[in-house]
Image (cartoon, rainbow, N blue to C red):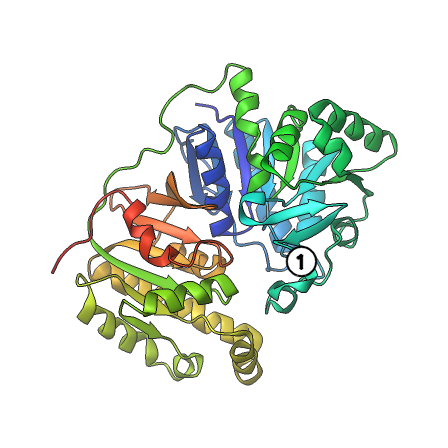
Amino acid sequence: MAILLGCIADDFTGATDLCNTLVKGGMRAVQLIGVPARGTPVPDADVVTIALKSRTCPVQQAVDQSLDALAWLRNAGATQILFKYCSTFDSTPEGNIGPVADALMEALGADLAVVCPAFPETGRTIYHGHLFVGEKLLSDTHMRHHPLTPMTESNLVLAMAAQTKKRVGLVPYAAVDAGSDAIADRFAALRKAGVSYAVTDAVADRHLLHLGEAMHGHRLITGGSGIALGLPENFRRAGKLEARDAAALPAIDGYEAVLAGSCSAATLEQIDHMAETHPAKKLDPFALADGYATDLALDWAKEHLGKSPVLIYASAPADDVAEAQKVLGRDRAGTLIEDAMAAIAKGLVKAGVRRLVVAGGETSGAVVKALGVTGLAIGPQIDPGVPACVTLGDKQLALALKSGNFGAEDFLTKAFSQMPGERKRP
């Protein structure tokens, strides 16, 4: 069967975030991990999101992977493509948002694409082209000091212009607030002026709904998961979207565990909250470098499985991360943690864990790759931007893949209550 919408996400948690938005809108969503092999059957779904690990990889690698994903999605029947990146516009000075968007635009023959990472439900809003996180400009938040994607520019027109040779313009608040017709008029004016990318203001969900209606028929859309809020209704109005329970998942029983690698402020608070009442073990990057910490963490976890969800984390404050990177090297420090989380995930599943929460995009990518996960069926929302999921295939797992910045303080503990199934008792 042909899918209605094809999505390309630059990390794993961002992909589930996007699918969550679409499922809430009534679209059955499947997330595939990496570009499927040629001949892979098209899932029975309204939308397929291909999750890449392309946010911080070399630019050409990100472009090549995204174009391969595009080719598969177009062969699967998608006529509209959404390129999803983080709601804080995470990117390195070299990209990768601009170069990937350029390549997709040229491959699709599109002449205008929206740039809108706004997600008001989680406090990400855009006003006069400036991205806010809560009441603060992006550049005034902890993202300014992110170890991989430091964000020091809040003006998205300037941030996008630094990553592309194409012209970047703005759809201001007045047009967005006036509704879809005013937005469409602004799109037409930007096209006439030779603008290829339209940064769009959005401070409330109604603005994203207006944008969704105005983007009907656009070949390429770029943004955070919020930009998808108004897309399901376009397909519904066209008679292409059936009424059904888009969030239904099978029940999965087993031991429960949490793996956290994100160093975001939200995840650090969630770790502190869970560690107050549940078994928790921190991974030391220097011990990981010596090669014994992974086995010790697994042995520790096996002693607690079934009694309570266990937490293993490598998350740390910015100063501690900087010290580890200084001693071990930036790339090696990150690789050590990702490899450890991957090995621990495999060991936990072998020990009977079937219900797993993972915090952090890079960590989630490493874990799903290690577990051989090829795809996810997306279910009900746990917190804004984070759904419960079940892996495709014979040996199913219940997963929640959380972007580092998302989730309430109690997310790591309450997530299991939203996963169909129960914890296995010893």
Task: Give the structural element (helix, strand or loop) at label 1.
Answer: helix
- Quarter of the image that includes the N terminus: top left
State the residue lying farthest toward the top: 239
Position of 153 compared to 247: left or right?
right
Identity of the residue drawn at 32% across and 33% down:
248
Position of 403 compared to 202: left or right?
left
Vertical placement of residue 406 versus 32, above or below: below
Write down the quadrant of residue 319 in the picture: bottom right
Vertical placement of residue 401 versus 295, above or below: above
Amino acid on which the number 1 mark rests in the picture: Leu
Q: Is residue 109 visible?
A: no
Identity of the residue drawn at 43% across and 55% down:
408
Considering depth in this image, is 234 or 130 the residue closer to the camera? 130
- Quarter of the image that includes the C terminus: bottom left
Write down the quadrant of residue 343 in the picture: bottom left
Q: Position of residue 121 (x, y in %)?
A: 54, 44
Q: Is residue 298 visible?
A: yes
Vertical placement of residue 94 versus 175, above or below: below
Identity of the residue drawn at 31% across and 71% down:
280
State the residue lying farthest toward the front: 135
Q: Position of residue 386 (x, y in %)?
A: 44, 47
**Residue carrying label 1:** 138
Q: Position of residue 215 (x, y in %)?
A: 66, 28
